[in-house]
Image (cartoon, rainbow, N blue to C red):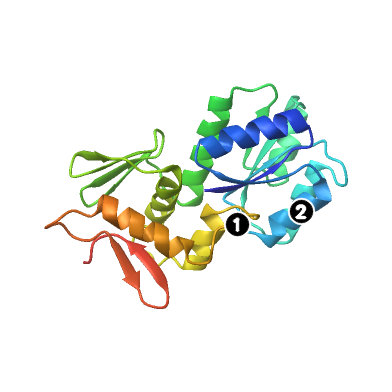
Amino acid sequence: MRLLLIEDYRPLQKSLAKGLREAGFAVDITGDGREGLWYATSNDYDVIILDLMLPGMDGLSLLKKLRAKGRQSHVLILTAKDTIEDRVTGLDMGADDYLVKPFAFEELLSRLRALMRRRYQEKNSCIHIEEMRIDLTTQRVWRCREELQLTRREYALLEYLAMRAGQTVSRTDIWEHVYEFNSSASSNVVDVYIGYLRKKIERPGKPALIRTVRGRGYILGAQV
């Protein structure tokens, strides 16, 4: 899924971005509050990771403006401020979660996965579609009891389609949730990766799981 990381401390910003990308997320980055607000209101992020002490505009002001504009992206506050009052203020202003520095990276990943599931109303850490099982925690996928070997990009695409299983997902939606703002990928890259996925998940004699809706996009789920 696609994240926005708003963190001005460069060493932490770089290490988090590297770790999150290795974990399969598409990550946009800024260290400035005003620029962060522009990113947050110009794109549809699954989760925004927000520091509070920022140049240009502090994190709480950014959060207040974001919610005033009606933006519904989940926000995880990441800060050194650890008093109960700080946490209550952040949550009451519209944050969805709060993680105090220093923190374990695995805990951050776990919280991000929980926010992702909440956004797409998916309570379970495993998604079952026909004879395919997707483990959201380990990012492993099986079809007909055979584990599939997917690249990070292929898995990210499959996960997004799975979160919206049974719905028509447009190419634009896929692009905005799987690729970063500065991505240099070509315009047909979504169709190319859909083709890669089909080759890996479809099985002879079994229902096709990825269907094309002409002019609209794709649906994950067997034909009813």
Nearest the viewer among 177 and 74 is: 177
Taking the image as shown, residue 149 lies to the left or right of residue 184, namely left
- Type of the residue with mark 2: Leu
Instruction: Check disc 1 and give the amino acid type.
Output: Ser
**Quick check: 163 above or below 8?**
below
Task: Please state if 138 lies on the left or on the right of 54 as rendered.
Answer: left
Q: Which residue is under mark 2?
A: 37
Q: Nearer the viewer, residue 16 or 88?
A: 16
x then y, percent, for residue 149: 32, 40
As drawn, 74 above or below 68? above
Q: CA distance from mark 1 to mark 2?
A: 23 Å
Q: Tell me the residue at 82%/35% (across/down).
A: 53
Q: Which residue occupies the foreground of this view, 51 or 94? A: 51
Residue position marked by numbered label 1 in the rendering: 184
Residue 195 appears anywhere in the view: yes
Query: What residue lies at 67% left-to-right and 43% top-to-bottom?
Result: 95
